């Protein structure tokens, strides 16, 4: 397997630069990356990663990556800014960030825990403060762990590994949901602690966000509250009293995604949830989400979930 065999090509929307998206599911097949402890649709645990291509392209992750630097150091560019991570640092990367120009020391070793966007979204898209804290990671992806925080991280890795090796039982999925949810909240608490510690040194405060960041936060919160009933960028721009073009510009700059992509991804997750967790028919879901007609809804589902709504339900129930 080649160093970048699990990448699929993607172009940015604003230029001709090639960025590749690393898919969560694709990592399940790369058993050469490190010591694969466990992998399923929601979590991947890989230890002792050393085989990293020195010609790694610019990438965008389709997951939350929690990387613990065990040895050595790495220099990388994330959303246009250079960051250094050393032994003992935790690196948090998500789908809002583009990673490029990575350079690793010869003794670099890292362990990673990957959590699917679906699980992360269940937390941050229903909690305003969690969303705000999560956005802080975009500009501050490298965290220095205290001994207590390191113990928390290692404890979650251990309990996930043990739990995932155990025989399945009736409540296994609910147990895993609880562990993952707790892990995400503890990671958010670590981020919040470091955010508060940095404030006196950098002059940051809860109220000191610039105008563009404040608007993007409001857009994302509006998107959550809207529950996928409105599909156009213009609708949200009107709510924010700005032009769609300006919203597109600052959203792309702050999160790495356009508003239309945020709207589409939120819509896909809403449809997935309604198909799996409700008894509504496809027609009723299409009406609830204000699609023009059931046929348009069916085409949208086939395009983004790979099958018809009925087939999706049959596969996942």
Image: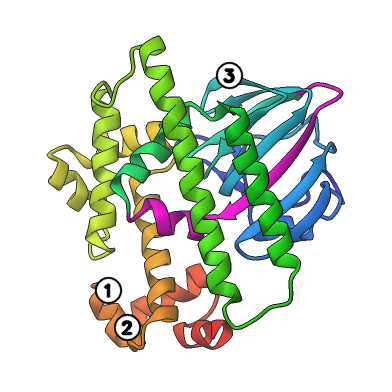
Find the residue positioned furthest to the front.
148
User: Is any part of residue 85 visible from this angle?
Assistant: yes
Q: Residue at x 64, y 58 (%)?
A: 43
Q: Residue at x 58, y 19 (%)?
A: 82
Sequence-first tag of 2 and 3: 3
Task: Estimate how packed mark 3 is, as few (under 14), some (14 to 19) or many (20 or more) residues with alpha carbons within 10 Å.
Answer: few
Which one is closest to the eye, mark 1 or mark 3? Answer: 3
Q: CA distance from mark 1 to mark 2?
A: 7 Å
Element class at badge 3: strand
List the residue tagged with mark 3.
82
Residue 25, numbered label: none
User: Is any part of residue 13 visible from this angle?
Assistant: no
Element class at badge 1: loop
Q: Relative to residue 273, is residue 86 drawn left or right? A: right
Q: CB under 8 Å between callouts 1 and 2? A: yes
Q: Which residues are magenta?
A: 104-126
Residue 258 at x, y percent in the picture: 38, 44
Q: CA distance from mark 1 to mark 3?
A: 43 Å
Q: Relative to residue 250, is residue 50 drawn left or right? A: right
List the residue tagged with mark 1.
291
Q: Residue at x 34, y 39 (%)?
A: 132
Which one is closest to the eye, mark 2 or mark 3? Answer: 3
Magenta stretch holds residue 130: no
């Amino acid at each position: 397997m080649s160093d970048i065999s699990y990448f699929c090509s993607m172009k940015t929307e604003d230029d001709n630069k090639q960025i590749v998206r690393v898919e969560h599911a694709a990592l399940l097949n790369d058993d050469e990356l490190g010591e694969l402890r466990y992998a399923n649709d929601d979590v991947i645990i890989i230890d002792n990663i050393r085989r990293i291509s020195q010609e790694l392209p610019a990438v965008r992750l389709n997951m939350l990556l929690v990387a613990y630097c065990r040895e050595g150091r790495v220099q990388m560019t994330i959303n246009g800014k250079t960051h250094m991570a050393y032994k003992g640092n935790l690196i948090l990367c998500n789908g809002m960030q583009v990673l490029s120009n990575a350079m690793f020391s010869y003794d670099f070793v890292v362990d990673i825990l990957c959590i699917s966007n679906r699980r992360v979204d269940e937390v941050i898209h229903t909690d305003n403060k969690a969303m705000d804290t999560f956005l802080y990671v975009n500009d501050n992806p490298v965290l220095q762990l205290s001994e207590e925080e390191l113990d928390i991280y290692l404890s979650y890795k251990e309990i996930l590994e043990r739990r995932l090796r155990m025989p399945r039982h009736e409540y296994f999925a609910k147990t895993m949901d609880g562990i993952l949810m707790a892990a995400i909240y503890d990671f958010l608490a670590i981020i919040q602690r470091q955010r508060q510690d940095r404030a006196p040194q950098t002059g940051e405060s809860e109220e000191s966000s610039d105008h563009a960041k404040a608007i993007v936060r409001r857009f994302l919160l509006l998107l959550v509250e809207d529950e996928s009933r409105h599909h156009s960028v213009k609708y949200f721009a009107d709510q924010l009293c700005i032009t769609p073009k300006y919203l597109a510009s600052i959203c792309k700059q702050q999160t790495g995604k356009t508003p239309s992509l945020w709207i589409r991804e939120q819509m896909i997750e809403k449809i997935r949830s309604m198909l799996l967790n409700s008894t509504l028919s496809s027609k009723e879901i299409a009406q609830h989400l204000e699609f023009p007609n059931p046929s348009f809804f069916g085409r949208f589902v086939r395009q983004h979930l790979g099958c018809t709504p009925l087939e999706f339900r049959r596969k996942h129930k």
